[in-house]
Image (spheres, grey):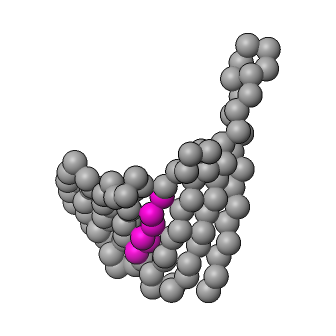
C-alpha cells in the first residue's frame, strides 16, 4: 500500500504601484521594484535566498535602449544595447530588435 503525502503550499502575492513581493513556500521570497529616474527606469529584482539584479534602462532619441546590469552575489556586470528597426513591407509593419550583450566577471 502506497503512502500519499500532501504538501500544503503557502502563497502570498503583494503588488504595489512600483513593485511586487511574492512568497511561495519551499521556493522563497521574490521581489521586484522599479522607479522612474532621469528619463529611464531603475529596477531591482531579487530572490531570497539567492540572487539580486540591479539595472537601469533608458532610451535615447534614436530608440536605442541601453541597459547596464549588476548581478549579485555573482559580482558580474552586463551591458545590453538594443536597437529596434522598423520598416513597412506589403502593408505589414515589421520590427527587428538587435541586441548586444557584454558580460564581465
x and y percent of residue 20 in the render? 27, 55
47 lies above or below 64:
below
Residue for point 51% across, 86% down:
75
* Residue bounds of the magenta highlight: 52-57
Q: Position of residue 82 (x, y in %)?
A: 64, 53
Q: Residue furthest front?
A: 61
The quadrant in which the N terminus is found is bottom left
Spot occupied by residue 34 in the image (x, y as percentages of width and height): 32, 58
Quadrant placement of the C terminus:
bottom right
Q: What residue lies at 44% left-to-right and 71% top-to-bottom?
A: 53
User: Residue at the right extreme?
Assistant: 90
Q: Is residue 4 visible?
A: no
**Residue 62 visible somewhere in the drawing:** yes
In the figure, 84 relative to 5: above or below? above
Q: Quadrant of residue 49?
A: bottom left
Q: Of 69 and 27, which appears nearest the observer?
A: 69
Q: Compared to 63, does 38 lie above or below?
A: below
- Asked if the stretch drawn in magenta spans residue 55, the answer is yes
Q: Main secondary structure of the magenta part?
A: strand
Q: What residue sits 70% from the left and 39% below the top?
A: 85
Residue at the extreme top of the image, as rendered: 91
**Quarter of the figure with residue 28:** bottom left
Image coords of residue 73 (percent x, y): 45, 85
Locate residue 90 relative to residue 12 in the image: left or right: right
Query: In front: 33, or 67?
Result: 67
Q: Residue at x 40, y 75 (%)?
A: 52
Q: Is residue 16 magenta?
A: no
Q: Is residue 67 above or below residue 39?
A: below
Amino acid at each position: 500500500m502506497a503512502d500519499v503525502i500532501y504538501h500544503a503550499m503557502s502563497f502570498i502575492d503583494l503588488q504595489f504601484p512600483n513593485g511586487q513581493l511574492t512568497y511561495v513556500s519551499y521556493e522563497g521570497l521574490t521581489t521586484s521594484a522599479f522607479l522612474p529616474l532621469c528619463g529611464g527606469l531603475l529596477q531591482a529584482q531579487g530572490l531570497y535566498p539567492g540572487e539580486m539584479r540591479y539595472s537601469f534602462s533608458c532610451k535615447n532619441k534614436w530608440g536605442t535602449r541601453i541597459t547596464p546590469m549588476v548581478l549579485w552575489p555573482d559580482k558580474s556586470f552586463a551591458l545590453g544595447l538594443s536597437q529596434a528597426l522598423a520598416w513597412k513591407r506589403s502593408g505589414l509593419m515589421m520590427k527587428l530588435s538587435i541586441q548586444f550583450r557584454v558580460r564581465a566577471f
